[in-house]
């Protein structure tokens, strides 16, 4: 079974993930596997956490043309693009992985 690294880290350090819960990040770094930065919560908890930290509105900040430009940019990294577009680096990573804006090329 393939797992995302943060979920595997949770299981190694804390045991099973109860049904219906997600492993969330206090640090907002999707690649983080530090057990001290991880906590369990529902999807609703994740959305509330996003809103409190100002991450949810990033999807409303970008236009389709900008998302396409981000995906086509091959030289600049997530941090640099995040600065240019005034969003969180995680937002750039999610766009590039097609976790968000999946309907666009």
Image: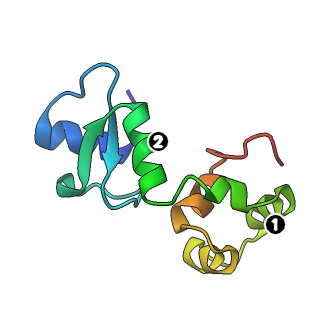
> Residue at position x 46%, y 42% from top?
47
Q: In this view, does 48 lie above or below 82?
A: above
Q: From the viewer's perspective, is 12 left or right of 78?
A: left
Q: Which residue lies furthest to the left in this view?
A: 14
Element class at badge 2? helix
Between 66 and 53, the residue placed more toward the observer is 53
Residue topped by disc 2: 47
Q: In this view, does 46 lie above or below 78?
A: above
> Residue at position x 32%, y 28% from top?
21
Could one spot residue 63 in this view of the protein? yes
Q: How crowded is mark 1: few (under 14 residues within 10 Å), some or many (20 or more)?
A: few
From the top left corner, tell me how far across and down residue 65 is, in percent: 87, 61
Element class at badge 1? helix
From the top left corner, tell me how far across and down residue 54 is, in percent: 50, 60
From the top left corner, tell me how far across and down residue 46 is, in percent: 41, 41
Which is nearer the N-term, disc 1 or disc 2?
A: 2
**Quadrant of the rendered structure where residue 103 is?**
top right
Could one spot residue 3 in this view of the protein? no
**Quadrant of the rendered structure where residue 67 is?**
bottom right
Residue topped by disc 1: 69
Q: From the viewer's perspective, is 52 left or right of 17?
A: right
Q: In this view, does 43 lie above or below 86?
A: above
Number of numbered markers: 2
Q: How far apart are marks 1 and 2 (CA)?
A: 26 Å
> Residue at position x 34%, y 21% from top?
20
């Amino acid at each position: 079974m393939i797992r995302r690294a943060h979920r595997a880290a949770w299981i190694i350090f804390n045991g099973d993930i109860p049904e219906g819960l997600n492993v969330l990040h206090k640090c907002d770094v999707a690649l983080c596997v530090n057990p001290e930065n991880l906590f369990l919560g529902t999807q609703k908890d994740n959305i509330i956490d996003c809103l409190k930290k100002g991450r949810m509105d990033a999807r409303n900040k970008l236009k389709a043309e900008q998302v396409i430009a981000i995906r086509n940019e091959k030289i600049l990294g997530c941090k640099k693009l995040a600065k240019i577009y005034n969003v969180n680096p995680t937002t750039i990573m999610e766009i590039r992985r097609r976790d968000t804006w999946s309907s666009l090329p």
